[in-house]
Amino acid sequence: MRWAWLLLTTMGLALAADDIAAGWWQGQLAKELGGFRLAVHLSRADGGAWTGTLDSPDQGLAGVPLSEVSVVDGTLRCAIRGAQTSFEGKLAADGQTIVGTLTARGTPLPLTFARATGTFVVNRPQEPRPPFPYDIREAQVANADAAGVSLAGTLTVPAGAGPWPAVVLVSGSGPNNRDEEVFGHRPFAVLADHLSRNGVAVLRYDKRGIGGSKGDYAGATTADFASDAGACLRWLRQQPGIAGDRVGLLGHSEGGLVVPVVANRAPGEAAFVVLLGGPAVTGADILTRQTILLSRTQGVDDTALAAIEKAHRALVKRAAEGASAEELRPLVKALMAAQGSPADDRTADAVAGGLLSPWMKGFLTYDPAPALRGLKVPVLALTGELDLQVEPGQNLPVMVAAFEAGGVRDYTVSKVGGVNHLLQPARTGGVDEYAKVEMTTEPRVLAQISAWILSRTAR
C-alpha cells in the first residue's frame, strides 16, 4: 500500500505541474527580432487534450488556433499550422515562466512567456463609442450586375432633416470588412464617425463573401469590386435623407483603383472622388518598390536590396506574362534566397500559387493612369509621406500628370507629412508600426477630408 500511495502521489504532482500551464501567458521577442508581443491562452479538456490560441497585437492577430499543443514533463510544445512556426519551452518550478525557443521558418528565436491574467490591452483612443449624434442604419445592397452578390453594410446619417451629402467608402486589398479592420484598428469606422459628426452621410460595406456580404471573394478581381462599389453608389443616391446629386466615392489603397473606374463608368452619378494612398502605376511596379522599401526598414543593406529588386522584378514580370506555377517556382526561390529566407518547395509553391490568383493576375498588369485621366469630377488625393506600400514619389507625379493630361479641372494632390499607408502618424512607415501606433488615423487627415468634401458639396 505504501508503494501504491507513492505512485499515486507522484502522478498527482505531475498532473498539477501540467495543469499550471493552463491560462494566459505573455511574451515579447527581442527588439532586434521585431519586438512583437505574443499572448498565448492554453486550456485542457476533461479528456486531457490541450488546446490553445495566439494573440499578437503588433501583427494584428487574435485567436489564432495553435496545433500540436502538449505539456509533458513540464515542457510546452505547440505550433501554428501552415505558418512553419513552433515553440518549445520549459515550465519553471514556480509555474510563473516558460523559457524556450520560437522557431519561425527554420530560424530559432529566444522567447520567454510569463504568467498573465489576460491578453494584451490595446489602446485605440479614436475608437467610436456611443452615444452617437447620428443615425445608424443597416444596409443590404444587391448588385444587379453580379448574380448572387449582395453587400452588407452600415449607413450613418447625420441627425436632422437633410438632405445630406454622402460618400461610399471602398476598402483596400484583402478580405476586408466594412470597417477595413486591420492590426486592431478600424479605419473606416473612425472615418465614418468623423464624417457623420460633421454633416456627411457614409456607407461602408463588407466585401463580397466577407462578413455579412454574399458572393465569391476568392475568385473576385478589382473589376468585380468596382461593380460592387457601383451598386453601392446607386443604392446610396436613392436613400431617404441623402442628397442624390452630392454623393461621392472614397477609396483607400486598392480602393483608389476602384473608384475612378466607377466614377467614369456612369457620368453624373459620382459627385466627387477621394483617393487615399491610391496607386497610379501598375501593380507589378507597386509590389517591387514596396518590397524594397519595407526590406530597407528591416535593415537590409544596399547590396542585398539590389539583388532583391532584380529577383522581384524578374518574378512579377513572368507572373504578369502568364507563367505557370512550375515556371515561377525557381524565380520565387531566387527571390527568397536574395531575402535570406529558406527556399523550400512548399513555401515557393504557395507564393507562386498566390501570384496566379485571378485578383493578382489583374493587379500586376492594370495601369490606373487612363482611369485617372478620365475623371470629370473634383478629386482629392492624399498619400502619406511615409507610405512604403504606395510610395508618394513613385505615384503622385504620375497621378498629377494624368490629371493634367485629362483636363481634370478641380484636383488637390497632397503628400501628408509624418503619415504612413494607413494614414496614421508614424516614424518609419514600416508595417511593424501599424499595430503599435495607438492612433488609427491622423487627425489632420480626417479634418482635411471632411473640410474638402463639405466645400465641394455645399449649396
Image (spheres, grey):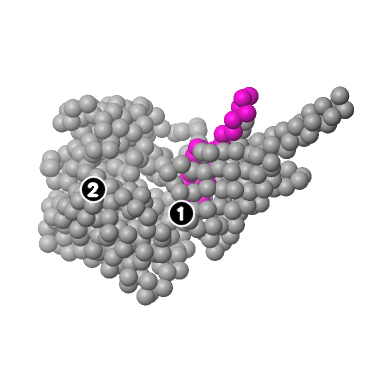
Q: Which residue lies furthest to the right in this view?
A: 2
Q: Which mark is residue 166?
A: none
- Drawn side of residue 258 relative to residue 109, left or right: left
Instruction: Answer whether residue 46 is magenta in the image.
Output: yes
Image location of residue 441, percent across then percent down: 43, 50
Instruction: Please name the residue shown 58% across and 60% down the image.
Output: 30
**Can you identify the residue that label 1 sits on?**
105
The amino acid at mark 2 is Leu
Q: Label 1: how many residues lie within 10 Å, few (<14), some (14-19) or many (20+)?
A: some
Label 2: element kind: loop
Marks 1 and 2, the one that precedes in the sequence: 1
The amino acid at mark 1 is Arg
Instruction: Answer whether residue 201 is magenta in the image.
Output: no
Q: Nearer the viewer, mark 1 or mark 2?
A: 1
Image location of residue 401, percent across then percent down: 17, 64
Q: Label 2: how many residues lie within 10 Å, few (<14), some (14-19) or many (20+)?
A: some
Q: Quadrant of the C terminus?
A: top left
Label 1: element kind: loop
Instruction: Please name the residue shown 12% across and 62% down the image.
Output: 405
Q: Distance between the residues labelled 1 and 2?
A: 23 Å
**Quadrant of residue 134 in the image?**
top left
Q: In which quarter of the image is the N terminus?
A: top right
Q: Magenta segment, which residues?
A: 45-65
* Residue 347 sits above or below residue 244 on the image: below
Image location of residue 300, percent across then percent down: 42, 69
**Quadrant of residue 12 in the image?**
top right
* Residue 443 sits above or below residue 78 on the image: below
Decide if residue 117 is in sight here.
Answer: no
Q: Residue 356 carries which label?
A: 2
Residue in front for this viewpoint, 336 or 177: 336
Instruction: Please name the residue shown 28% across and 65% down the image.
Output: 311
